[in-house]
Amino acid sequence: MAVKTVPIVLLGLVLAFPSLSVQGASEGLLLWYQTVLPALAPFLILTQLLTVSGGAELLVKPVYPLFHRLFHVSVSGAYILLCGLLCGYPLGAKLCSDYFRQGKISQKEAQYLLAFCCHPSPMFLLGYVRQQLPVSIPPLFLLLSVCLPIPLLSLLAQKLYRPGYGSQNPSSPVCRETASVSLESILLSSAETMVLIGGCMMMFSIFALWIRQISVLPERLQALITGAVEMTTGIHRISTVFPEYTAIPPALAAAAFGGISGIFQTKSVLSDSFCHRTQFPMTAKNAGGLSIRHYVLWKLIHAGLTCIAAQLLISLMQPL
């Protein structure tokens, strides 16, 4: 019953506060159009082109020995991790879902990768987060704060999922319809994914604006809740209300978590992947799903570790 009443309550709030709702929707869509769409859409299209053309293995070949030694992933898993590190939310999760459905990685490896393959991109950290922070900090500081927890997450996920440590298995089921995938279907798939992301950003930007209007909440608590709801507006708010170096750990933790909006974006690409749309054959090995609950738990752990790493790096940097 509670689940059924939530949309009714939200609809009532939209009708009760129409100007705030329109403002929040405008902010979310503008942010999506100016920041997320141009940064993510080309990566979505190109990674799918690489996948269907067979170029993914060629791209990942130089880094595969390092990734295999550090993270014990297959060739396909190394490609997923590389794209997740470079391209930002939710591409790592999308590739993880696509490759799992195509049978290119096992369910255990997909679950394992999902624990640490989704991150804010270096472009987002250096181009947006660094500009929002109230103090200027070295670019390496931002990257280390988010990336240092990844090996620890990998170790924890290995213990839980036990994905296996072999190299790419040539006998694993591979989608045989890859060659028939057209550029039009790739563009359509990417456009649908971007619309899903834009819809999530719009709705959660409305919620974030509502939170900022709750006067009984302290400003800093409002900022932290906003960061947990929608990452991008939350980082701006945290950087505004927290003083100097105090703003860095919670802002980077919000970036590492990705916000509830990011969780819904990830859920959408896990349940409605490109491979599923193009009707690749399903097998007993890839018929199951990937747990969004596990994903949320890993993002919370990543956010906490990022906050600790940022605080430690600040303590090392300040005496200088």
Image (cartoon, rainbow, N blue to C red):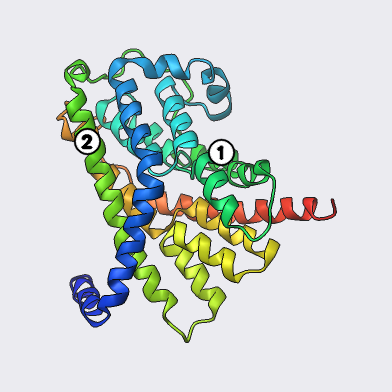
Residue topped by disc 2: 189
Q: Position of residue 229 (x, y in %)?
A: 41, 64
Indicate the quadrant where residue 271 lies: top left
Along the line of sight, the residue nearer the viewer: 204 or 25: 25
Badge 1 amino acid: Leu
Residue 292, can we see it? no
Q: Position of residue 109 (x, y in %)?
A: 40, 32
For marks 2 and 1, give the CA distance.
Answer: 33 Å
Residue at figure coordinates x 30%, y 60% from the top left: 202
Q: Which is more N-terminal, label 1 or label 2?
A: 1
Residue 278, can we see it? yes
Give the left or right position of residue 285, taking residue 314 as reference: left
Q: Position of residue 86 (x, y in %)?
A: 49, 34
Q: Which mark is residue 147?
A: none
Q: Which of label 2 and label 1 is nearer to you?
A: 2
Residue at figure coordinates x 18%, y 29% from the top left: 185
Q: Which mark is residue 155?
A: 1
Give the left or right position of residue 98, taking residue 40 as reference: left
Badge 2 amino acid: Ser
Along the line of sight, the residue nearer the viewer: 252 or 23: 23
Give the left or right position of residue 63, taking residue 280 as reference: right
Q: What kind of element bears circle 1?
A: helix
- Badge 2: few (under 14), some or many (20 or more) residues near its Cα, within 10 Å? many
Q: Quadrant of the N terminus?
A: bottom left
Residue at figure coordinates x 37%, y 33% from the top left: 43
- Badge 1: few (under 14), some or many (20 or more) residues near its Cα, within 10 Å? some
